[in-house]
Amino acid sequence: MHRSFLGCLIALFATPFAYSATLLQQDAGYFAFEAEDYSTKNNANWSTISTTTGTVTLPDGTNAVGDAIYNSGGGGLTSFVTYDLQFTTDGTYYLYTRYSMYDRTVNDAASYGNEDSFYVARNFGIDDTSGGGADVDWYNQGLSNQGHRPANNASPNPNEGQFFYWDEATLSPVSTVHSYVVSGASEENPLDVTFTIANREAGVAIDRFVFSTTRISLTGGNSPTLDGIASVPEPSRALLSFLALGFLLTRRRR
């Protein structure tokens, strides 16, 4: 029996859970999670990158928290990443994204302005099979020129996956702060929603997302407040910890 349990545990450790994750809100007022903890993606344009692996790699000394996701294909609304979220607290939530431009053509400084944006679904529940297109149900989320790229596109790019900055969700083309409404959520009965992003320009790398019921000020794209909000744990880690604990308790009863 114990050998069978151990065999199952080993198999679970070898299984990639990250691509079927459902993330559960842990604290009232905000919901932070890592960009690489997505539930589904529909093609290879979006991929997980680290300092050692990926389509491109994060440079040593990067300020990314853990891994990031990177978009290698532009064009817009052809490559989607979806997150399954469970909210436990009602409210109006503002969205903050921590991301970086990542030069897709090292020797082409002019490309800096073509790697700084991606699409975000205007509401929960919009996915790759629904929505009215750009500036209708999908809006362009892009870093401003607050030092995030060199003046006049001069080389080198100060980001290159080295420095990630926070940006507040702002609807385009009207440039108004956007928010998401959560209603009917509780700890006893979490509200299931899907949150989806899509490609727009190749070369953007995303580190983290935070939904917050409080608007948080940014200084040049930096925010100690947002940096200090811990991401929710990956469900796979919680499951494996539970199984490991169960195995240890079973052994102790022998």
Image: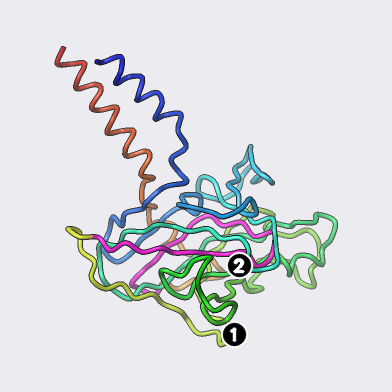
Q: Residue furthest left?
A: 253
Which quadrant of the rendered structure holds the C terminus? Answer: top left
The residue carrying mark 2 is 118
**Residue 222 seen in the figure:** no
* Residue 232: mark: none
Query: Which element type, helix, strand or loop, lies under badge 1?
Result: loop
Q: Tell me which amino acid carries mark 2.
A: Phe
The kind of secondary structure the magenta stretch mainly shows is strand
Q: Nearer the viewer, residue 169 or 126?
A: 126
Is 13 covered by the magenta stretch? no
Residue 105 appears in view: yes
Looking at the rendered structure, the secondary structure element under dot 2 is strand
The answer to whether residue 193 is magenta is: yes
Other-residue count near label 1 (Cα within 10 Å), few / some / many at <14 / 14–19 / ≥20 = few
Residue in the picture at 46% in, 49% down: 37
Q: Position of residue 112 (x, y in %)?
A: 75, 65
**Quick one: 53 or 64, which is closer to the camera?**
53
Residue 187: horizontal and vertical position, in percent?
20, 59
The percent coordinates of residue 253 (x first, y second) are 14, 16
Determine whether, in the image, residue 239 is placed left or right of residue 72: left
Q: Give the magenta part as a residue range.
A: 190-215
Q: Residue at left 36%, top 68%?
A: 212
Q: Is residue 99 left or right of residue 185?
A: right
Which corner quadrant holds the N terminus? top left
Q: CA gap, disc 2 to disc 1?
A: 14 Å
Q: Earlier in the sequence, mark 2 or mark 1?
A: 2
Q: Which residue is mark 1?
A: 173
